Image (cartoon, rainbow, N blue to C red):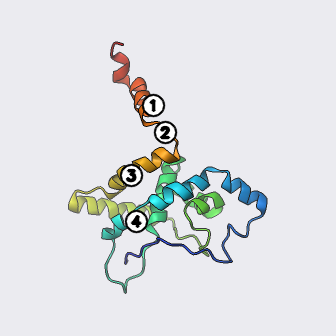
Amino acid sequence: MAFKPNEYQQITMEDRFLNLDERTKKFVLNSWAKGFAEIIFPAINEKRFSVLYSDNPASRPNSPVNAIIGALILKEMFNLTDDELLASILCDVRFQYALHTTSFKSQPFSDRTFSRFRERLYLYNLETGRDLLHEEMEAMANVFVKYFDINPSVKIWTALWYHPVAKKCPD
């Protein structure tokens, strides 16, 4: 499978989001999906993951890596199983909007997309000792702070306050 970046997505006249009624569009744009689509999704560095794929251009192209990484982030945000994540992507326009896949005729995910991607990550980690997903999440830390509107000092204080060891410490 050859790596093909998914940096630019052109909206077509058949885009699912454009063809929604105004009420539904309003709900999507007032939901978590808009911020995810505008803040988190564009910050995903899919080129970091190109090493997981063949450099033979004659190979079948990969599923959009930024959409896979975005979907895995959503999986953690909503505490979903792989099957629940896939169902949400296939049936919920908010997930498609967040992942910039509303223009796709069919969603670029299957029941094996996430497990195959995790397998590639695992084998690469065994071979090189590099955890690409962990590197990406660390690189995106400031993006998450912006999206979740987190005050980093409050988060650290809260984590310490609720940590079992911290509770044992004297004031």
| Quadrant for the C terminus in the image | top left
Dot 3 or dot 2: first in sequence order is 3
Residue flagged by tag 1: what amino acid is it?
Val
What number is the disc on residue 166?
A: none
Badge 3: how crowded within 10 Å, few (<14), some, or many (20+)?
some
Residue drawn at x 60%, y 63% as measured from the top left: 96
Residue drawn at x 35%, y 65% as measured from the top left: 49
The nearer-to-camera label among 4 and 1 is 1
Labels 4 & 2 near each other (Cβ < 8 A): no
| Quadrant for the N terminus in the image | bottom left
Residue 88 found in image quarter = bottom right
Badge 4: how crowded within 10 Å, few (<14), some, or many (20+)?
many
Residue flagged by tag 2: what amino acid is it?
Ile
Residue 92 showing in the rendered view = no
Labels 3 & 4 near each other (Cβ < 8 A): no
What number is the disc on residue 150?
A: 2
